[in-house]
């Protein structure tokens, strides 16, 4: 893969977890805008179960305007848990493809994690809600610069997606800014 394409893809990974711009890897990732009222209460779900959370999740909606089709897999890596984040991207020359990167994950508490981005910066994510069947979940953080609705499937589950949207609203997110992924 050409270095320029890899740099572009790495930038997309940074965008996916709340970065403001697709920049080459060594550059700093500035804190993104907040999509939630920071005075609103926020908390992780008591239903979180790490074993059930493992596996593939598709991002169905999020707050980043540049968000595109992506998925992640919460798995055991050679040095501990990782979030294998996969995206489909195209560079300016029309070269397209799937790209995945393993991002180290540190558990901060039940349903609370820190992900190490390719540039070495970290981004917290909390599991705010998950349905009883572990088919749909809401990820966010206290800063409000990150929020995803994720699902085990790329389609269906309208009732669960509606519930997930309500959870984001309850946790202070401005759901009018939520972008659905088709």
Image (cartoon, helix red, strand yellow):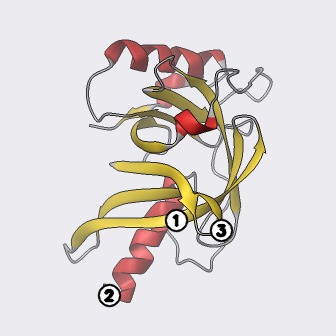
Position of the N terminus by quadrant: bottom left
Nearer to the camera, 10 or 28: 10
Relative image position of residue 129 (x, y in whole percent)? 59, 23
Label 2 with label 3: CB-CB less than 8 Å: no
Q: Which residue is mark 1?
A: 102
Asked if 116 appears above or below 31 in the picture, the reply is below
Residue at position x 39%, y 79% in the image: 6
Relative image position of residue 169 (x, y in whole percent)? 59, 18
Mark-to-mark CA distance, 2 and 1: 19 Å
Q: Which residue is mark 2?
A: 2
Mark-to-mark CA distance, 1 and 3: 11 Å
Return the disc, 1 or 3, that comes first in the chain's sequence. 3
Nearer to the camera, 46 or 163: 46
- Badge 1 marks a residue whose secondary structure is strand
- Badge 3 marks a residue whose secondary structure is loop
Asked if 25 appears above or below 21 in the picture, the reply is below
Position of the C terminus by quadrant: top left
Residue at position x 70%, y 65% in the image: 121
Return the disc, 2 or 3, that comes first in the chain's sequence. 2
Nearer to the camera, 163 or 29: 163
Residue at position x 80%, y 24% in the image: 39
Relative image position of residue 60 (x, y in whole percent)? 38, 35
Q: Which residue is mark 3?
A: 79
| Few, some or many residues within 10 Å of mark 3 (<14, 14–19, 20+) | few
Report if residue 142 is visible in the image: yes
Query: For the residues carrying marks 2 and 1, which lies nearer the camera in this image?
Result: 1
């Amino acid at each position: 893969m050409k270095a320029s394409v890899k740099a572009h893809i790495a930038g997309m990974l940074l965008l996916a977890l709340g970065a403001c711009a697709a920049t080459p890897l060594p550059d700093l990732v500035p804190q993104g805008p907040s999509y939630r009222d920071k005075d609103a209460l926020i908390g992780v779900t008591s239903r979180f179960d790490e074993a059930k959370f493992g596996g593939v999740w598709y991002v169905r909606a999020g707050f980043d305007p540049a968000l595109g089709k992506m998925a992640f897999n919460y798995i055991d890596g050679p040095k501990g848990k990782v979030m294998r984040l996969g995206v489909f991207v195209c560079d300016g020359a029309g070269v397209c493809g799937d790209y995945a990167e393993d991002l180290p994950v540190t558990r901060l508490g039940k349903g609370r994690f820190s992900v190490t981005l390719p540039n070495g910066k970290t981004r917290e994510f909390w599991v705010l809600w998950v349905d009883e069947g572990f088919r749909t979940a809401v990820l966010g953080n206290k800063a409000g610069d990150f929020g995803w609705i994720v699902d085990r499937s790329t389609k269906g589950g309208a009732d669960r997606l509606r519930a997930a949207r309500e959870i984001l609203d309850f946790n202070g997110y401005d759901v009018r800014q939520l972008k659905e992924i088709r």
